[in-house]
Image (tube, rainbow, N blue to C red):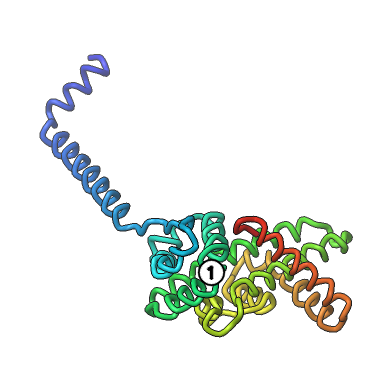
Amino acid sequence: MSLNSLLASVIHRHRNAVYSVAGCLGAVVLVGGAWLAYDLLRRPPLPNLDLPQTQQVQLADEVARFMADARGWRRLSDPERKRFMHKVLHTIAAHPEGRRALASEFRRLAPREKETIRQTLIETAKRDLLEQSREFNRTSPHRRGARRRMVDRMIAGGEATRQLMRGHGGESDLGEALSEGTPRDTEGWVRYLTNHTSGTDRQQIEPLVNAVQDRIRQISEDPAERARIDQMVRQVLDEFDHSGGTI
């Protein structure tokens, strides 16, 4: 008996079981497809930040809800998350009224929603730190100048982001409204992320974290170095202003 004939015979003898399995598989596919469609419908749409400035204040609630929804901002890739946040800073948060409205909406979020934002910030920052750590570790310790430049860029970038989030402080401070329970400066962030990292990842980031902490101490004791870092921060902020919302 040929293989085809044998298969046909087996299927014929067990056709009821075959039909049952096929029916179950079909049901699984239908249910899976229905769930996917339902999930897609429930996902909040990406807020349109390209509206005219006069209409952007009205987006404050939509932006806050999108970021606080586990199916919204958190579903985006790391580059997409950053682009969205930078666009927010460059549009609605670039104007006093819009910034105050956005900070107010963040403060009104429920604890669970704030936690979703906090976890998304931590995940993104941790992956950034790991990527920077790998580059730092690949650079020979003998190339002290190259390593120091990496650390200085990281410190300047962190301070520039802090200033962008803070704005003029008070009711317009997005950092205070968004990052409840998390540090506000570069040294605090890297220490915080280290404490929330374990195993191999922690071993990878420790050399860079130690270098950042040592460098911050050096800068705090040397006015000339402090002035140089301040200049780097201004350059980052200028680049952000002219970039349309990217750092």
Image quarter of the C terminus: bottom right
Q: Quadrant of residue 205?
A: bottom right
Question: Where is 215 relative to 71, above or below?
Answer: below
Residue found at the very far front of the displayed protein? 54
Image quarter of the N terminus: top left
Q: Which residue is mark 1?
A: 93
Which of the pair 213/1 is nearer the observer?
213
Q: Amino acid at mark 1?
A: Ala
Horizontal relation, residue 69 to residue 181: left or right: left
Residue 135 image offset from top left, x and y in percent: 73, 57
Residue 70 image offset from top left, x and y in percent: 39, 64
Q: Residue at x 55, y 57 (%)?
A: 83
Question: Where is 124 relative to 167, above or below?
Answer: above
Looking at the image, can residue 209 be seen? yes
Q: Quadrant of residue 139?
A: bottom right
Residue 149 image offset from top left, x and y in percent: 81, 63
Horizontal relation, residue 182 to residue 46: left or right: right
Which of the pair 61/144 is nearer the observer?
61
Horizontal relation, residue 5 to residue 191: left or right: left
Horizontal relation, residue 46 to residue 180: left or right: left
Looking at the image, can residue 207 be seen? no
Q: Quadrant of residue 195?
A: bottom right
Q: Residue at x 57, y 68 (%)?
A: 94
Residue 92 image offset from top left, x and y in percent: 51, 66
Where disc 1 sits, the SS reads helix
